Image (spheres, helix red, strand yellow):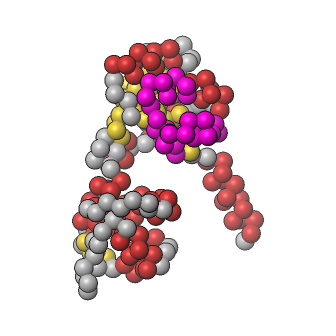
Amino acid sequence: MAKSENISMSVIRRLPRYYRFLSYLDNQETQRISSKKLADIMNVTASQVRQDLNCFGGFGQQGYGYSVKQLKLEIGEILGLNRQFKAIIIGAGNLGTAVAKHMHFEARGFELVGIFDKNPDLAGQILRGIEIRPDEEIESFCDSHTIDAAILCMPRNGVELVIERLYSKGIKSYWNFSHYDIASEYKDTIVENVHMSDSLMTLCYRMNQR
């Protein structure tokens, strides 16, 4: 696998879609696929597929196309899905519970190792085989475990109170379901913001235009 610097975020954000579609094709026992057929599935052009994949080295063969299984493995390696970064969830309410229960972390490059909530009634309950710990134990848990990322499933004001504590323990990567702008306050963090309301409003716009 060739590494490349300065790859655009638009290319990077297409990689999980490639991986998802290739995983489906692999499960269907599809052996190979042309750039055109992959482009049709991705709803992009064949030229775009070739340009995207060439950012990381050539994977196809002239006249053959791409090996589905091999390309899936290559993209999985590019994404780092074999790394198993250690992650914790902050917030075990409805959203945090849903994320813990239904997200296949291990297949997405992460291992969930801790869950925290400020509600004392939740402390000691078991979620996904993990004991929910009280909020005040975050620092001590981070001291005894190497934590790579935090998943923030709480309201904006809750994040404001906890982010400094997480950052002080060296956690600089966040999957952020709140509306708090972490990156503007902590410039060296890696943040993926999840705004479900934005996605729903985009659907509303597209339906409105129709």
Q: Relative to the observer, which residue lies in front, 141 or 36?
A: 141
- Asked if residue 82 can be seen in this view, the reply is yes
What residue is at 72 percent from the left and 71 percent from the top? 210
Instruction: Name the residue rendered at 46%, 70% in the picture.
Output: 42
What segment carries the magenta color?
A: 163-192
Q: Residue 200: x percent and y percent?
A: 66, 53
x then y, percent, for residue 167: 49, 28
Above or below for 43 versus 132? below
Q: Residue at x 52, y 43 (%)?
A: 191
Relative height, residue 27 to residue 50 (above, below): above
Q: Magenta stretch containing residue 21, yes or no? A: no
| Residue 47 image offset from top left, x and y in percent | 43, 80
When the figure is inspected, residue 89 is found, relative to residue 139, above or below; the finding is below
Query: In the image, is 198 to the left or to the right of 190?
Result: right
Q: Is residue 33 left or right of residue 94?
A: left
As drawn, the residue found furthest toward the right would be: 208
Answer with the quarter of the image where residue 111 lies. Answer: top left
Q: Can residue 177 be seen at all in this image of the molecule?
A: no
Q: Which residue appears farthest toward the bottom when viewing the image?
A: 63
Looking at the rendered structure, the number of numbered marks drawn on it comes to 0
Tell me residue 31's x, y (percent): 24, 72
In this rendered view, identify the residue nearer to me: 29 or 7.
7
In this view, 53 is above or below 82: below
